[in-house]
């Protein structure tokens, strides 16, 4: 282990009043002959699809080479894995997990409980399971089956996705809330912990960087869960950004800090930065990537995952998504929201992220 890494470990394991007497100066490492490659202080992840990770596809090499973690964009959602109440489809999920194992990457399992009516997280048969006892049994069985299948192979799960209303700090009265009760989040987390005691369990939420009331509500939800001893290891902030909605400076760092004080890890789990509708100068996009990555690292996030790999395949350019999100309707050009361009070349934003993630 290099002197540089050791000194960082020493620094991070000491209380602040003792570091000055124990830690060797970090600059010592730079005087040795073989300078170590910079180590990332947080994982860099990407949302992926099994199809685009096939051997001849460009994403395979890019992901294996540049990323530390993968999140199945859709392959582990129940709309994919549970085509009927009694059948399972593991084709895409298995392929992604096998790819990650071959490539030495972590897997963030996404997602088990997602009740947004528009979110495609629930298969039709589950939506139609109206009896509360049947519904609860189907949900808990689904968590058990999926988490058990990947025990030891999926390091962390987004157990509950988007529990809040889109634009407020109200818990969404979705099918899980209505049929399992207000404690459905707790039930889901406990079922996941029983299925794999070693996997990290996360909840994942969107738009908290733009909506202070929603950020506060998320902190209170986590405070309550931790206070009741519910197994919860991390909170994901999706961070789908928009150039036309100014991101308040410090919003991300403050929320990460507030959550970490409650004893959970925090990650940015779905970052993308669509370009302006007028195909504006990409420096605005790059500045936003830098703001986000700098705040994430400064506040001690453990991961920054981008929602896709290259600009060739982003959910933001799909016609149905464009039709459903008002500001995207005005786009006459591709959104180009990711770190690699359509041909797989690293964009300046990739260097910005890499620099932020490897800074000491
Ligand atoms: O990017 C995903 C898109 O391909 C799917 O059609 C959609 C519905 O399943 O989900 C998208 O991913 C979402 C993620 O799972 C949760 N947060 C919002 C993401 C973008 O909609």
Image (spheres, helix red, strand yellow):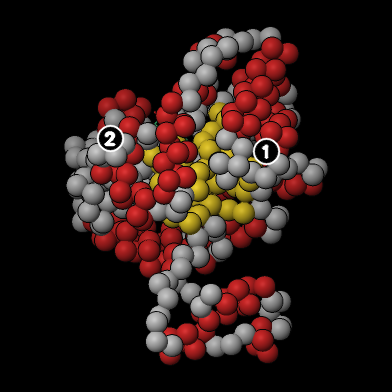
Q: Quadrant of residue 349?
A: bottom left
Residue 71 screen position, x and y as percent: 46, 41
Name the foreground residue: 56 vs 48: 56
Name the foreground residue: 319 vs 133: 133
Name the foreground residue: 9 vs 307: 9
Name the foreground residue: 274 vs 33: 33
Q: CA distance from mark 1 to mark 2?
A: 36 Å
Q: Are marks 1 and 2 in contact (CB under 8 Å)?
A: no
Query: Residue at 64% of width from left, 10% of height from top?
Result: 130
Q: Residue furthest right?
A: 228
Q: Name the element at disc 1.
A: loop
The residue singled out by tag 2 in the image is: 317
Question: Does 356 appear above or below 208?
Answer: below
Q: Earlier in the sequence, mark 1 or mark 2?
A: 1
Q: How many marks?
A: 2
Q: Is residue 321 visible?
A: yes
Residue 173 screen position, x and y as percent: 63, 25
Regarding ligand 1, which quadrant of the image does it lie in? top left
Residue 207 screen position, x and y as percent: 49, 43
User: Is label 2's Cβ within 8 Å of ligand 1?
Assistant: no
Query: Residue at 32% of width from left, 64% of height from top?
Result: 351
Q: Quadrant of residue 158?
A: top right
User: Closer to the camera: disc 1 or disc 2?
Assistant: 1
Q: Name the element at disc 2.
A: helix
Question: Horizontal placement of 299 versus 317: left or right?
Answer: right
Question: Horizontal placement of 60 versus 10: left or right?
Answer: left
Query: Residue at 59% of width from left, 30% of height from top?
Result: 149
User: Is label 1's Cβ within 8 Å of ligand 1?
Assistant: no
The residue singled out by tag 1 in the image is: 196
Question: Horizontal placement of 131 versus 345: left or right?
Answer: right
Residue 308 screen position, x and y as percent: 36, 43
């Amino acid at each position: 282990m290099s002197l540089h890494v050791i000194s960082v470990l020493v620094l991070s394991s000491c209380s602040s009043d003792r570091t000055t007497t124990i830690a060797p100066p970090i600059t010592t490492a730079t005087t040795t002959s073989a300078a170590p490659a910079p180590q990332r202080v947080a994982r860099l992840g990407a949302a992926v699809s099994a199809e685009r990770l096939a051997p001849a596809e460009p994403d395979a090499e890019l992901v294996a080479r540049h990323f530390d973690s993968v999140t199945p964009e859709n392959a582990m959602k129940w709309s994919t894995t549970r085509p009927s109440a009694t059948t399972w489809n593991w084709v895409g999920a298995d392929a992604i997990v096998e790819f990650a194992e071959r490539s030495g990457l972590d897997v963030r399992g996404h997602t088990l409980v997602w009740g947004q009516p528009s979110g495609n997280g629930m298969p039709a048969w589950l939506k139609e399971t109206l009896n509360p006892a049947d519904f609860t049994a189907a949900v808990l069985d689904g968590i058990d089956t999926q988490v058990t299948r990947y025990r030891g192979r999926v390091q962390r799960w987004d157990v509950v996705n988007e529990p809040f209303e889109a634009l407020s700090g109200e818990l969404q009265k979705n099918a899980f809330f209505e049929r399992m009760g207000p404690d459905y989040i707790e039930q889901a987390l406990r079922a996941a912990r029983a299925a794999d005691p070693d996997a990290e369990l996360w909840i994942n939420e969107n738009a908290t960087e733009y909506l202070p009331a929603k950020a506060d509500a998320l902190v209170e939800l986590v405070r309550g869960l931790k206070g009741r001893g519910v197994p919860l290891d991390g909170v994901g902030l999706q961070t789908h950004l928009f150039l036309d909605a100014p991101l308040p400076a410090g919003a991300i760092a403050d929320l990460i800090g507030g959550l970490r004080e409650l004893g959970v890890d925090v990650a940015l789990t779905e970052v993308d930065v669509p370009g302006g509708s007028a195909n504006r100068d990409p420096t605005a996009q790059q500045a936003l990537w830098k703001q986000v990555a700098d705040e994430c690292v400064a506040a001690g996030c453990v991961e920054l995952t981008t929602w896709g790999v290259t600009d060739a395949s982003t959910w933001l350019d799909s016609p149905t998504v464009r039709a459903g999100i008002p500001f995207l309707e005005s786009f006459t050009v591709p959104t180009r929201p990711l770190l690699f361009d359509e041909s797989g070349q690293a964009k300046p934003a990739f260097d910005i992220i890499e620099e932020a993630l490897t800074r000491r």
